[in-house]
Image (cartoon, rainbow, N blue to C red):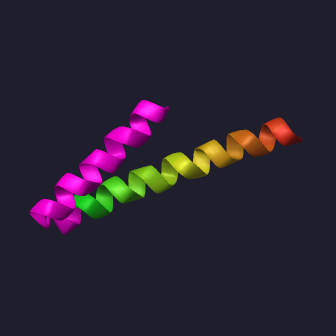
Amino acid sequence: MIAYTLFVNNMEKELKRDLCTEELEFVLWLYERYQDEEQQHLDIIVI
């Protein structure tokens, strides 16, 4: 999943450079969703 995080970070930089706010918002939404899923996974492990 580190590769995915790096991909998102690179994509975010590119989109900010191009000022494509709609695409940036979509990528950030996907990334937030990914983080939420990771957190839920960690919660399950803790339980």
Where's residue 14, x and y in %? 18, 53
In this view, 4 is above or below 33: above
Is residue 28 shown above or below 45?
below
Residue 20 % position (x, y): 15, 63
Q: Please tell me how many numbered marks the rendered image carries.
A: 0
Looking at the rendered image, the quarter that the C terminus falls into is: top right
Characterize the magenta stretch by its predominant secondary structure. helix
Considering every residue shown, the one lying at the far right of the view is 47
Q: Which residue sits at x=25%, y=48%?
A: 11
Q: Is 31 placed left or right of 23 in the picture?
A: right
Q: Is residue 7 magenta?
A: yes
Q: Residue at x 10, y 61 (%)?
A: 18
Rendered location of residue 45, percent (x, y): 81, 36
Question: Is 8 situated left or right of 14 in this image?
Answer: right
- Image: magenta residue range: 1-22
Which residue reaches farthest left?
Answer: 18
| Image-quadrant location for residue 38 | top right
**Who is closer to the viewer here, 16 or 35?**
16
Magenta-drawn stretch contains 18: yes
Q: Judge by depth and name the residue closer to the eye, 45 or 10.
A: 10
Along the horizontal axis of the image, is 1 left or right of 11?
right
Left or right of 10, for residue 42: right
Please report the residue visible at 43 percent of the width from the left and 41 percent of the height from the top.
5
